[in-house]
Image: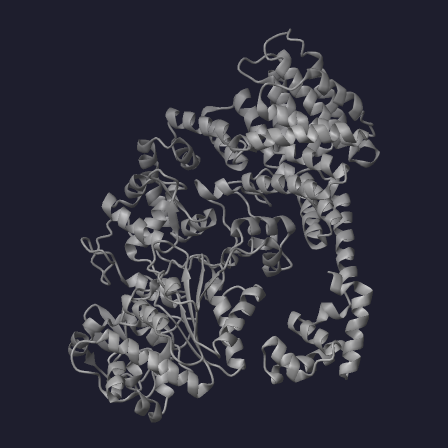
Amino acid sequence: MLFPVATFVPPRDRDSARANATERESPARGAPVGVFPGCVLVDAPGAGCGGEKAGPVGNGSGGRSSWGFSVAPRAFVRLRGPVVRGSPGHYAAGRDLPSYFLPGNLWTAARAWVPGRDEPAFRDSYSLGEAGVPEAASVFGAAAGAGGPSVSRSHELDLLRQWLRLSRDSAQFVRLSGEPGVGKSHLLRRLTRSARRDGWVVAAGRAPRTGAGRPFDAVVDALDDLLARADGSLFERLGETATRHLASVFPALGTYGAASGPVDHYAVSRAVRAVLGHLAREGGGLLFVVDDAHRACPHAVEFLEHLVRHPPDAPVLTVLAHRSVPAGRHPTGLTEASDDVHQLRLSRLPDESLRALLPARVGPVAAAVALRDAAGVPGLLGTPPDGAGPCPVGAEPGPGLYGVLELALGVPPLVASGARGPDLHCLSSLGWRTACAAALVGDPFLPEVVAGTAVLPLPDVLRGLDELYAEGVVVPDGPGRRFRFVRPVVRARVHHASGAGWRHAARDRAVAALRAAGDTFALAAHLVHADDPTADDLRTLAVAARSGVFRQPGRTVLALRRIVAVAGDSPESSLLRAKALVLAGRPGEAERVHAGVWQRVTAGCPGVDVVDAVVWRARALRSLGRFAQADALLGAAGASGAGEGPPGRVAGASGAAAVRAERLALALERGQVPGGGPDGAVADPGGVRDAVAEGGPGDDPYVRVHEGALLAAADAVAGRAGAARAALDRADRLLDAVEGARMAGWLETYRWLGEAELRLGRAHRAAVFFGRGFDAALRFGQGYLLAPLAFGLGRALLHTGETDSAAFHSGIAADAAGRYGYHWLAPAAEAVSLKATRSSEDHSGTTPLSVISTREREIAELVGAGYTNQRIASRLGISTKTVETHMSRMFKKLGVNSRAALAHTMGRDSQEHGFHDR
């Protein structure tokens, strides 16, 4: 829903605006009633903007707005550019704005950057040229105005309530910080609702998102309505001088007459402090909240510092919320000013808390991808499209999986909708244009490349990056000169919001700039969609495909298809494409590619790594459950490993070791399938294990750790616990030394380490290995390992008693088995998920603990201990009326009608379910 915003008339422009206005009668709602140079006046009577009831524009009452000028029954709202009508009585304006624009967009779309100034100016003077600024659409979906995520922050809320109670004795101050989207505003809304229910006076405001428009902006937003409703006695106690100082800042007091001369900011600060004290004493306590304090004007920050140094002698709790970005103006000195300043930093939430926000229709794999992209920030969590999981751009229709790097480079996939993310509506034209160009280039990016893409001078781009850094959108990437988006998903959202037409025109510029900068990897991501790639472009694509096959297999498949479409097929490119298809979890396609090229491979094609081809074809067959074919393929390759034969044959000790290791993995795989697998064969893991041990580890440390993990799993399966533990210790030490970027090619190592630990009964250690592998497979988009790693993680978590997480990951395993191979794991994964669900229900279902809240449970325990309602209220720091309300709710939930029955019910549940021991 759109609201009229009156900040389009800066104070410096009001007199000239009134002088130039030409009014005319127009009875129809929304009709133009006046003409300003370069703007339109819209008649929007009764469209409130923050007041308690419909009335004049703004927060004011009594015929005055919160922007300091009188308004008639028909308020004049100055809007720049064409007027777009949304819902009845609500309007937006700007440069070609869509109907779903939010209030924060209105100012942004109307302003542009002026060269030679440090701050964006609010006028359309910047020449956009051919690279016009793309439309600043609603980047983060409908939830951007939905009021924040509904996640539980009970601990933080309890702390704020405790400080609220402490302020009864002396004024308290709280600094609430956290990154964008972590839930600061949502927590403040919960606190203010709770305080109002308990009878506190609440003054809540926020700094404007479009830059400071007037002195004491956030303070005025919080207190103007309260001053408008105050009776004359308040101002009699303040005195005429203090009231006049307040009238020079607060629009609600305009009738009292402002003090002569310029605004005395110190006098205003003292007067506001006195107002807070009077309001707190009259109302029994005051909660004073300032949100988005990192955008507050210097005068508001100075007042807050004055308030800490000279706290009012009244029950006042001041809560200051700001982002944890170093570029913002934070009142960091407040912590040293008083012992009554409390620090509360909101951290990221665990996935267990975020899972409750996802709709039930979202599939397990899609839910895992959404949780990965959110990275613990509830504001970045959205709903995957159609609940089927995202698809890589350019891939065939159907469910797919994308890795984090595919969000960072090239054309990113369409990510989950409905998330908030960083607030981009407050960006200037220069900031938005810089963000769009940077998103098109990809992460990380050089400012020079962004300048070439956006057609801007480098100093302008650096100013735009300063703005994006201050808003927490981009950060420096290490000690070099590059920058990156704070989250890959933020880059993806900005990219798709920038407009398809603008991207089409800017892509060629981005390719030219990347080519000049020599950024091969980022350039290749754009060349996938190039119209006429040159021979150099094809070589760049080939290099990027070879180096990125493990880190972004989906993008590698697209790059190789582009090479084949232009230059024709070759055995080397076909084998690399088949390998990428296996990694991406498409073993059926990989086997078809292998079958088409295998005759040429076995005939001795020069330049082909046959060992690698044999191993990855065997893995594709293993994923499909065709164990007999995989065994025959590996057996034939092992027989030719003596180092003789035509070119292209498996040769050398390293080739024989790789084949033996894959045979051991195949044997262990078949051991997990009831009956030895679909082909009825029975594996002999002991014999294959001995062959691997006799061959000895290779020189490559990654090969050694992988073989060590296989040997540990084989020993654990055979019941040789001592040998398995020794092998695990060696592999674990090696793993600590080699983990890094190259580990993307050896993620199956985590699976076998986890299986060995689980066989030895060390479920917690197994969960660690399975979890590391699962997170890495999600990060790199290696779908072929999702099912076995999630299956192992679900089993390990079930053993450790984490039944909810066990059910979730077992569901992922069942879902991934049907999508990306290992289909025979699906029934076993579903069985583990069902067992975990039942175990969770046995512990928490149909008991008093499952139907009452945490606060109600505390009250019920005190009732059982013989406490009266008054003593409970004193013990918990709440009112007696609140205790009575909780008691009434518990009686209804539990079907009891007396305190004795309540105590009996809770005592019985404690004995039967071990509540006090949990």
Q: How many labels were placed on the picture?
A: 0
Vertical side of 280 occupied by 835: above or below:
above
Residue 42 appears in the figure? no
From the viewer's side, name the closer residue of 676 and 97: 676
Answer above or below: position of 493 versus 206: above
Q: Measured from the top left, where is residue 432 in percent x and y?
A: 33, 54
| Image location (x, y in percent) of residue 245 | 24, 81
Q: In which quarter of the image is residue 290?
A: bottom left
Q: Residue at x 42, y 67 (%)?
A: 339
Q: Nearer the viewer, residue 466 or 380?
A: 466
Query: Could you tell me if residue 476 is visible in this image?
Result: yes
Q: Nearer the viewer, residue 531 or 57?
A: 57
Q: Position of residue 504 (x, y in %)?
A: 36, 44
Vertical position of residue 240 compared to residue 473: above or below: below
Residue placed most toward the observer, 784 or 284? 284
Q: How is the image coloured?
A: one colour
Q: Position of residue 179 (x, y in %)?
A: 45, 56
